[in-house]
């Protein structure tokens, strides 16, 4: 795959590294010459110093044969203009981060796949994990998150069947019991104290899922 990465901040640099590791042909664009020089010291990429909103810079990057362009700068105006140009060049897959939520509609109108402000997403997730010491994230996959939660002795849902739990946008994948027994849960399985439950939650419902599980599986502190 031929990938163009715009912006060499933390996200762009890591994205370029992942693409190189997977054997893709990678071109990076950044206005900072030092950033371009630094990434060339570590990865086999083509680095172009310049403004990606300049059509000639994109042409130098091989936009006409790109399979994907990903805009990762902290400036939504730059990201949007770059993505618009990529669409004009008929790049099959155009992706961008969106730093300010109110700009999301603009990217959607252009037909760009978007990711919300990564700093805000990370901050929210860190807060919820810090608030919930009995939860452990296992994996983040497209569309959702897999994590583990421990059912505490005295929690409201102990000794209740799974089918009694109001489930929306999440599902129990497995339950590990004391002694090492692994259970593939069905609706009639009862939750016991110290059960370690593996959960899949849709990305957009993660916070609500955590609140629901906290309410049902954590012992009241009152």
Image (cartoon, helix red, strand yellow):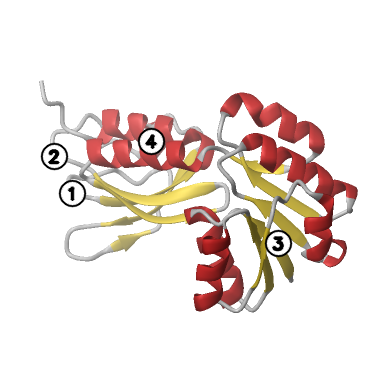
Residue 207: percent from left, percent from top: 41, 33
Reading the chain from its start, which is encountered first: label 3 or label 2? Answer: 3
- Residue 133 occupies quadrant: top left
Return the residue at label 1: 194
Return the residue at label 2: 153
Reading the chain from its start, which is encountered first: label 2 or label 4? Answer: 4
**Which element type, helix, strand or loop, lies under badge 1?**
loop
Residue located 78% across and 57% down the image: 57
204 vs 23, nearest the viewer:
23
> Which residue is farthest top?
222
Cα–Cα gap, marks 3 and 4: 29 Å
**Which element type, helix, strand or loop, lies under badge 3?**
strand
- Residue 108 occupies quadrant: top right
42 vs 117, nearest the viewer:
42
Return the residue at label 4: 124
Residue 140 as seen in the image, left or right of residue 25: left
Tell me, yes or no, whether the two marked residues, 1 and 3, touch with CB atoms within 8 Å. no
Cα–Cα gap, marks 2 and 1: 7 Å
Residue located 75% across and 59% down the image: 68
Reading the chain from its start, which is encountered first: label 2 or label 1? Answer: 2
**Which element type, helix, strand or loop, lies under badge 2?**
loop
> Which residue is farthest front?
33
Which of discs 3 and 4 lies nearer the camera? The answer is: 3
Which of discs 1 and 4 lies nearer the camera? The answer is: 4
Reading the chain from its start, which is encountered first: label 1 or label 3? Answer: 3
Number of the label disc, if any, that sits on residue 4:
3
Residue 137: percent from left, percent from top: 35, 52
Cα–Cα gap, marks 1 and 3: 48 Å
Residue located 18% across and 49% down the image: 194
């Amino acid at each position: 795959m031929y990938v163009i990465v715009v912006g060499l901040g933390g996200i762009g640099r890591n994205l370029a590294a992942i693409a190189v590791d997977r054997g893709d042909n990678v071109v990076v664009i950044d206005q900072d010459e030092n950033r371009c020089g630094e990434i060339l010291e570590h990865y086999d990429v083509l680095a172009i110093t310049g403004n990606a909103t300049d059509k000639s810079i994109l042409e130098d990057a091989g936009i006409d044969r790109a399979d994907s362009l990903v805009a990762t700068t902290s400036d939504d105006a730059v990201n949007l203009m770059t993505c618009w140009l990529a669409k004009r060049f008929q790049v099959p897959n155009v992706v961008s981060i969106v730093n300010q939520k109110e700009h999301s509609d603009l990217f959607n109108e252009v037909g760009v796949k978007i990711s919300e402000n990564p700093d805000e997403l990370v901050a929210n997730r860190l807060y919820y994990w810090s608030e919930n010491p009995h939860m452990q994230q296992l994996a983040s996959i497209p569309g959702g998150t897999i994590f583990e939660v421990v059912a505490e002795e005295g929690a409201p849902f102990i000794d209740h069947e799974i089918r009694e739990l109001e489930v929306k946008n999440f599902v129990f994948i497995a339950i590990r019991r004391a002694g090492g027994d692994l259970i593939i849960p069905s609706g009639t399985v009862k939750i016991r104290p110290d059960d370690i439950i593996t959960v899949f939650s849709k990305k957009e419902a993660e916070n609500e899922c955590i609140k629901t599980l906290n309410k049902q599986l954590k012992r009241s502190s009152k």
